[in-house]
Image: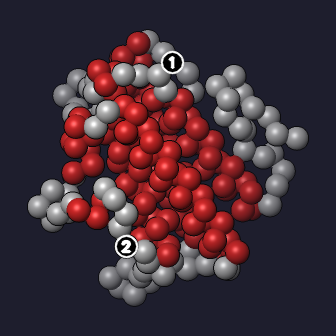
Amino acid sequence: MTDVDEQGRTEPPLAADEAATLLGFLDYQRATFEWKCAGLDASGLGTTVGPSSMTLGGLLKHLAYVEEHWFSQCLHDRDRQPPWDSVDWKADPDREWHSAADDSPDQLRALWQDTVSRSRSLTAEAMADGGLGRLAARTWSDGRAPSLRWIVLHMIEEYARHNGHADLLRESVDGVTGE
């Protein structure tokens, strides 16, 4: 039985195998982030808190980039997809954060949603080719390669950390609070 909460998020399974549990938690974190960004206009997505320059729009673009990096580039050793393929990352290593201000809310949401969809497909491809133990095709500078299990857990951590930021940002925009 699948439980869906009042925000429309599918709860992770209570008693499933390792893969379903990990992927369930990753999708739950993704859904939490999507909820925090839902319904906001450019002003809302551009709001900052205190001295930080972080915005929900910047988070949307950053998390799209992180999804692309881990599931496409690292896991499958694929070339960067647009819009990431035209960025001079050495000259502007934080491009995704500040360039979000140039994109509309619809563009930011579509970029993130499309990238998450592609990440799910790439994950399914890797699951069929070795499961959670499958090593990334791209190695680190020391020759080691993370497993799909490591990448999924890293992405859960990435979303959980940024969902904390999203909570603060969303509350400052319109007072919406919750998990």
Q: Position of residue 34 (x, y in %)?
A: 52, 35
Question: Which residue in the protein does label 1 denote?
Answer: 177
Question: Which residue in the protein does label 2 denote?
Answer: 79
Residue 172 against residue 65 in the figure, above or below: above
Q: Position of residue 93 (x, y in %)?
A: 20, 57
Q: Which callout, 1 or 2, points at the residue further toward the start of the chain?
A: 2
Say whether residue 71 is left or right of residue 148. Answer: left
Question: Measuring 49% from the left and 50% from the top, which residue is drawn there?
Answer: 114
Q: Residue 9 occupies which quadrant of the picture?
A: top right
Task: Give the number of the disc on residue 16.
Answer: none
Question: Measuring 29% from the left and 21% from the top, which residue is drawn there?
Answer: 43
Secondary element at tag 2? loop
Look at discs 1 and 2 and give the one toward the viewer: 2
Q: Is residue 97 visible?
A: yes
Say whether residue 147 is left or right of residue 59. Answer: right
Instruction: Count numbered badges in the picture.
Output: 2
Question: Measuring 31% from the left and 56% from the top, which residue is drawn there?
Answer: 83
- Circle 2: residue type: Asp
Q: Position of residue 13 (x, y in %)?
A: 78, 46
Residue lying furthest top:
175
